[in-house]
Image (cartoon, rainbow, N blue to C red):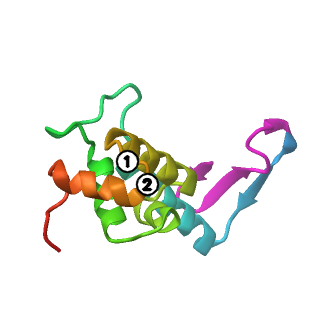
Amino acid sequence: MIIMDRRLAVLPVNTADAHAGAVVLHGTGAVTALCALFESTWATAVPLGAVPVRDTSGRTRQEKEVVRLLAEGLTDESIAKRLGVSPRTARRIAAELMERLDGRSRFEAGVHAVQDGWLPATR
C-alpha cells in the first residue's frame, strides 16, 4: 500500500503477484480509512528482531490480555477482533498458553492459570 499526501492510495490487486496490477483510490473515505489502518498498525508495531517484554511469569502483554479475555469467556474470533490480529493468531496464542499451563482443555488451563497466579481467584 502506498499513500500519497493523504489524498491518494495505491493498492496491489494481488499481493502475491506485483505484476497483476494495482488500484488507485482517490475517494476521501477510502483513503482516510486506509490512513487509519496504517496508523493503527504502526502504533502496535515493534522493530524487527525486538525481544518482547515479559513479566515475571514469562508472559508478554499480549499473552496476559489473551488470558484475561479467555477468562471472560470470549471466543478466539472475539479475542482476535479485540487484539487486532487474525483468528488464526488468536488460536495459536491460546494454544501456546494452554500448553504452557499444561491444560488439556480450556477449563483445565483456566484452573491452572488461577493456581499459578495468572488470574485472580475471585470473580
Is residue 16 within the magenta segment?
A: yes
Q: Which residue is mark 1?
A: 103
Pick whichever, 41 or 2, lies toward us: 41
Toward the top, the furthest residue is: 49
Pick whichever, 110 or 67, lies toward us: 110
Q: Residue at x 43, y 47 (%)?
A: 93
Residue 11 relative to residue 28: left or right: right
The x, y position of residue 17, in whole percent, is: 81, 38
Q: Residue at x 14, y 64 (%)?
A: 121
Amino acid type at circle 1 is Gly
Q: Which residue is mark 2?
A: 105
Quarter of the image with the C terminus is bottom left
- In three-dimensional space, the C-alpha distance between marks 2 and 1, rounded to whole angstroms, equals 5 Å
In this rendering, the answer to whether 33 lies above or below 90 is below
Amino acid type at circle 2 is Ser
* Element at label 2: loop
Crowding near the residue tagged with mark 1, few <14, some 14–19, many ≥20 C-alpha atoms within 10 Å: some
* Magenta-highlighted residues: 1-19
The x, y position of residue 77, in whole percent, is: 52, 65
The x, y position of residue 13, in whole percent, is: 79, 51
The x, y position of residue 52, in whole percent, is: 29, 35
Pick whichever, 93 or 16, lies toward us: 93
In this rendering, the answer to whether 3 lies above or below 71 is above
Q: Are marks 2 and 1 in contact (CB under 8 Å)?
A: yes
* Element at label 1: loop
